[in-house]
Amino acid sequence: MSAVLIFASVIAAALVFAIAAVTVGREARRLDSVAPRAVYELEQATQFVADHLPGDTQARLTYSELRKLLVFHMRWLHDKGLQPAGVVDRRQDIVDEVVIDEQTVAAYLLGAAEQNRIEVLQDVDVVHVVKAHLEYFDAIGAIGPQSND
């Protein structure tokens, strides 16, 4: 009688292991095909960018101005289709490479700052903001590799 019990226990353990292996494998495959979740938090981004700016740029831009510039940058990304809605658990279906030109973004931010009465004393400050903001995107995993061009 104990041999039957041992045999049944071994069969039950093998079935549990097989079910677990199939379930884990299926979920791993599903998660591999889904875009990674990069969570953008404005306050965290503002702090990160502020910490990564050169000292002279930090002295010329207030925290509030920096925050507004980051919001303008995010709006620009959304307008270009780089911040689409409904990306949670979305399959990775990006066909075309998207390249962000730092000079174009800096020019846009200078125009947005002027329209919104944000006084930028040195244009280079906006260039530093763009570079630091892109570093934040890289740190949270929301940006791909740099182009060689």
Image (spheres, rainbow, N blue to C red):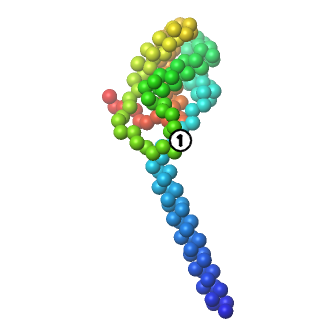
Residue at (67% x, 92% y) in the render: 1
Q: Is residue 31 above or below residue 87?
A: below
Most extreme residue toward the left is 149
Q: Residues within 10 Å of mark 1 (few under 14, many from 20)?
A: few
Q: Is residue 25 above or below residue 77?
A: below
Badge 1 amino acid:
Val
Q: Position of residue 80 (x, y in %)?
A: 43, 26
Residue at (55% x, 21% y) in the render: 71
Report the number of numbered marks: 1
Answer with the quarter of the image where residue 10 lies.
bottom right
Q: Position of residue 44 (x, y in %)?
A: 62, 29
Q: Which residue is mark 1?
A: 88
Q: Nearer the viewer, residue 59 or 36?
A: 36
Can residue 62 be seen in the rendering of this structure? yes
Is 40 left or right of 78, judged from the image as shown?
right
Q: Nearer the viewer, residue 94 or 41?
A: 94
Q: Position of residue 85 (x, y in %)?
A: 51, 34
